[in-house]
Image (spheres, rainbow, N blue to C red):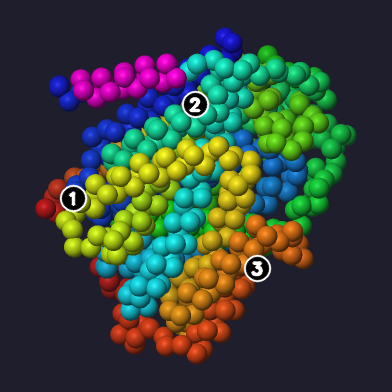
Amino acid sequence: MSKAIGALIIPLIYMVVVLVLGHGKWTKSLRLNIDDFYKVSAGAAFPLVFLGLAGGYHSSFAIPGSMGFVYSHGIGWIANGLWTLFVAGGVMMWLAPRINYLARKNNYLTPGDLVAEYFDNSDGVRIATAIATISFSVGYMFTNVIGPAILISTLTNNLVTYDVACFVIILVVASYVWRAGIRGTMWTTVLQACWMFVVVYVAAAYCTTLVGGIKPMMAAMKEHYIEYLTIPGPKGFLTNVTWFSWAAIAIGLGGALKPVTWSFFYSARKPKEAMKIGYTIPFYLAGIYIPVVFIGFAALLIVPGLTGVSADNSFPKLLYDYAPAWFGGLIIAGAMGAGMSTLDAETNISSCIFISDIYKRYIAPGKDERHYLIAGRWSIVVLAIITYIFTHYRFSIVAIIATLVNAIVALYAPTVILILSKGKLLKSIKITAAGYICGMITGGALLIYLNFISKVSNPLGWHYSAWVLATNVIVMLLVSQFTKGPSVESKQKFEKSIDELYIKSAPEEVSL
Amino acid sequence: MRLLENRLYRVISLIVLLTVLLIPSIVWASEKIEPLVEPQIEQANIILIYGLFLIIAVIFGGLLWAYKANRDVMKSLEQKK
């Protein structure tokens, strides 16, 4: 019991600090409108954008899920860093400045704003994008409560039960998102990003020392678990096909263009700072993958033989058996940071998409900004309640949702890439509103089929994200051949805006 | 001053609420698993002491960096007005 209480002291201090950061005067909006509530309309300082996005990028899978992954599948996990650096980083460097510039010029608030405007403000495109992006964000919210809640209940020996942990996490997050929108999200995530990053490295140093150092660790791994030092790993999961179809598309592309990253692209002060996101964040993200391997290996050696869900909890088990209670508390706080930093950002963008793309346009148009702000805050309360209810389905539906949401980005990413491209070849490809919508519907139907109906979710070993992407692109291109495209004025407007970014004599706020 | 007191009151109220919510329930029976290597617990615990200082330093540094940058941005916005 005393160990459990000892493990709780630091998380409690952490929660208090999060509440102070999330409610402090530095989170006050400059203007009382949804534009400044859901994004920083004047542009946020780079550390807030960088750490705000970096901390929220990794879901609660970071702690302890990624360690459990290494425990089950071996060293192949570290290759994920390559996909993060090259795919996610490359896409962000390429598209973030364009998205930022268009958003500042045309006052966008959601991904749907950009895509719909390209297609002459098509209502169908806006609604389809809103449904896809809000499905992603809400699905992601559920999963980021479960991991930290399990860790808390494990490390406190169920002194704090799973249900109580879920309730407290959701309540704290909802409180500062309700009050301060994206600013509350950014400031708390600065703390969480710093905490999470360094605590994982300290944990790796601790775990490595626990087994006697790196050399003894590797010698023991070679003696007992040689298959864990290979690809595709002991269960044959990490094949080349898996890496390309899962890591590159679902994780890399999905992470770069998921809805929440758009709110940070929009909040950067200028295109150059948006581009900085692309070449800084991947190093932060990939940097966390390295210590994870050492932790996973140490868990294999210290608490061997765990399978299934217990394997996912191997790191908490190791901490509970060997680490002092206060360090377990630090890890709990780190895991809470990983989950809460994603939960708050997803709550913010989910509310934003609902209010801006659906409520303001189709349910209650023509009201004043105060009305939409109040509606937005109510939507945050509703989202919090829905999240709490869904956390009670933790190992069945939520597990499926957690994996399939990343594939949702494949439904709109190809079109976004084509809209924002400058190259003649990509610009020559015809895309229409009807093609976009049909591609989304077909891809979405396939996603649901592969995950809920089919017995095989990864046909021929290819992750379903790849199938959804391919289907979406093929249907979109086919339907586009027979339907009307966006107006010449709209296409020229986008092309001209993107060209402005690359003019050397452009003002400093614009030029790259 | 009143505003600070109100915020402090809210924080204290939340701490009390959190403490009340921490009601012990079922005790999870922890089964000891035999490790494959002998754990070096004392040496590992020394790492944690250094690690704690590192964690505090990084968090403080990150918040300070964000605070200063935000202050500069707010100043430049004021000047533009």
Q: CA distance from mark 3 to mark 1?
A: 44 Å
Q: Chain of mark 3?
A: A
* Residue A275 appears in the rendering: no
Residue A399 percent location from the top left of the image? 62, 46
Mark carried by residue A194: none
Q: CA distance from mark 1 to mark 2?
A: 34 Å
Decide: is A446 above or below A487. Answer: above
* A273 horizontally vs A404: left or right: left
Residue B4 percent location from the top left of the image? 20, 23
Residue type at numbered disc 2: Val
Kindly identify which residue carries mark 2. A164
The quarter of the image holding the N terminus of chain A is top right
In the image, the segment drawn in magenta is B5-21
Residue A9 percent location from the top left of the image? 48, 17
State the predominant SS element of the stretch in magenta: helix
* Secondary element type, mark 3: helix
Residue type at numbered disc 1: Arg
Decide: is B43 above or below A47. Answer: above
**Sooner in the amino-acid sequence: mark 1 or mark 2:** 2
* Secondary element type, mark 2: helix
